[in-house]
Image: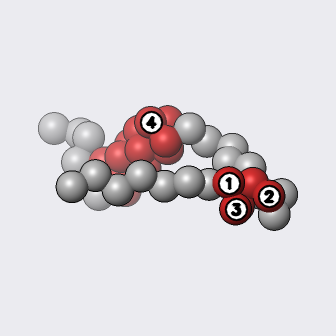
Amino acid sequence: MIKLTDPSKLHSLGWKHKVELEDGIKVMYDWYLNKYNLGAK
C-alpha cells in the first residue's frame, strides 16, 4: 500500500518546505551517525 501526501493545504496557509525530502533524510542520517559515533570505525 502506498500513501501519498498532498501539501496543498499547507501551501495555501503560506507554509513552504525549505529542504527536499532526500536532502533531509541524508542530513538526519549523517546527524545520527555523528551523534552516536557510528561513522568512525
Label drawn at residue 30? none
Mark 4 vs mark 1, foreground winner is 1
- Residues at discs 3 and 2 in contact (Cβ within 8 Å): yes
Identify the residue at image location x=61%, y=42%. Answer: 19
Secondary structure category for the residue under label 4: helix
Residue under label 1, please give it: 8
* Residue under the image location 26 percent in, 40 percent down: 39
Residue denoted by label 2: 12
Pointer 3: what residue? 9
* Disc with the residue nearer the chain's start (4 vs 3): 3
Location of the C terminus (image quadrant): top left
- Please tell me how crowded label 2 is: few (under 14), some (14-19), or many (20+) other residues with Cα within 10 Å: few
Locate residue 8 relative to residue 41 in the image: left or right: right
Tag 1 near tag 2, CB within 8 Å: yes
* Alpha carbon distance from label 1 to label 3: 4 Å
Counting every numbered tag in the picture gives 4
